[in-house]
Amino acid sequence: MGNIKLYDDFILDENMLTGRDRDVVELMIEFGGVTYNDVLLNTIFYGQTYNTMKNRLQKLRRRGLIRYKQTNLFKPRYAIVFSSSTEEFLFDVYGFKVHQVNPNPNTIYHLMLEQQTYFWLKRAGKNVKRTIVKKWQAGGAHKHTPDLVYPLKNGELVYVEVENTTKRADRYIDIFRRTKIDNPKTVLYVFENEKKMKTLGKKIPLWDKIRYTTVDLLRQGVLENGKIDAVKQVDFFKKNNIKIKG
């Protein structure tokens, strides 16, 4: 929501909030008004202690900007959401409506991984955007809607798929077919860890435009050299002795 002024007196006072505070609010706005402790600890507060993050969030809560909401899961136990007054202000002034997150655990875990991916791609200097199916596919402009997308300097697109759970074989085939019609420059698959990169990645049809990475490798590459650390799908298959399916 780039049209929302983050320094409005009601929401954010530039003299009272840190840059990290503004990053938290911006991340929440981008993802419909929600985030989680584990996300923030692995992004905005990366390298800081849990207590440092907790104390900063408590200040935002005392200022009436955010609140905690139970997820009914063991982990994450709580979601960080906007307070009722902040929600009302955002809607009245900017028409921003908070989205209700599906309580399904897989949906929440996917959202957490997507938020981390989004943050580190932004830190790598990518103009990354979330996609909305109706807008992205309007007028037949695109056949497949990835989780995230960003343009290269020449205007070609990179599709970003956050892969957290397995899909049926026919689902992968359908995604693959529609993605090939769109013909992006690259399709970057981001997995939670290397174990999932192997177990889930082997089910994805082979294409020379596909790259694999994990959220940890993504973060490491951005922090160390400002670049996205990813491996070609075919090279990953060969390294792990995975049978290549054309």
Image: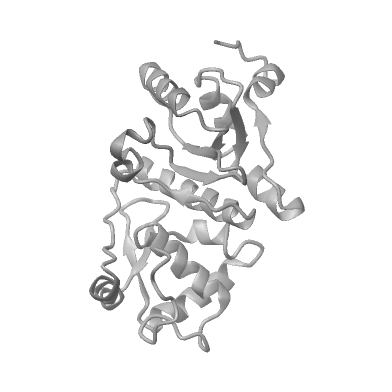
Relative depth, front residue between 47 and 220: 220
With respect to residue 45, does 195 lie above or below?
Answer: above
With respect to residue 78, does 231 lie above or below?
Answer: above
- Tell me what residue is drawn at x 45 percent, y 22 percent: 176
**Tag count in the figure?**
0
Q: Quadrant of the C terminus?
A: top right
- Tell me what residue is drawn at x 55 percent, y 38 percent: 156
Work out which residue is located at the far right of the displayed protein and give it.
Answer: 225
Percent coordinates x, y for residue 73 in the rendering:
35, 50
Q: Quadrant of the N terminus?
A: bottom left
Quarter of the rendering containing residue 140? top left
Residue 54 seen in the figure: no
Q: Is residue 143 left or right of residue 228?
A: left
Relative depth, front residue between 236 and 60: 236
Q: Is residue 215 left or right of residue 79?
A: right
With respect to residue 117, does 212 lie above or below?
Answer: above
Display coloring: one colour
Percent coordinates x, y for residue 29 in the rendering:
39, 64
Residue 106 seen in the figure: yes
Quarter of the rendering containing residue 28? bottom left
Percent coordinates x, y for residue 97 in the rendering:
26, 63
Percent coordinates x, y for residue 24 in the rendering:
48, 68
- Tell me what residue is drawn at x 34 percent, y 70 percent: 82
Q: Is residue 243 left or right of residue 137?
A: right
Relative depth, front residue between 207 and 167: 207
Relative depth, front residue between 23 and 186: 186
